[in-house]
Image: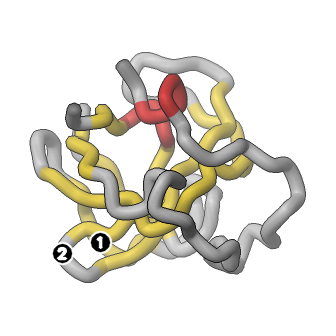
Amino acid sequence: MTGAAFAAGTATAGAVTPDAAPTSVASKACGKGNPIKAKESVKIRKTRKLNSTAKGLYPKGAKAKWAACEVEYGQTYSKCGWHNDNRWSYINYRGTKGWIPTACENFIV
């Protein structure tokens, strides 16, 4: 199961500018803070674009948490077995917050 299949928040187009982190207030049921695991090693990006500044590396098998409730739309990518996907998740991995392609995460039950 990928992170997008269970998204407790909603994917919203244009709700946030590409350079900004989500600003919505999280409720306990929104998914913020839920654990995820990296399917593949992927760079944590400043914005929802593949050529955006890398803030760090989220290594394969590492655990992180969602830092926001929503999955947001951004640049289209073909990563982690998906093609032409444009969903991005805002995560917190060891204190580094940023964006990763949603297809590159697994929800930990």
**Residue 34 percent coordinates (x, y):** 32, 53
Picture disc at residue 94: 2
Determine whether the residue tagged by mark 1 lies in a helix, strand or loop: strand
70 or 18, nearer to the observer: 70
Q: Is residue 50 left or right of residue 56?
A: right
Q: CA distance from mark 1 to mark 2?
A: 10 Å
Q: Nearer the viewer, mark 1 or mark 2?
A: 2
Task: Give yes or no for contact between labels 1 and 2 (Cβ–Cβ under 8 Å).
Answer: yes
Relative to 19, does residue 57 appear above or below in the rendering? above
Q: Is residue 47 left or right of residue 34?
A: right
Determine whether the residue tagged by mark 2 lies in a helix, strand or loop: loop
Residue at point 65%, 72% (across, down): 22
Relative to 34, does residue 80 appear above or below in the rendering? above
Marked residue nearer the N-terminal end (1 or 2): 1
Q: At label 1, which amino acid type do we have? A: Gly
Instruction: Report which residue position mark 1 lands on.
Output: 56
Residue sitting at the far right: 14
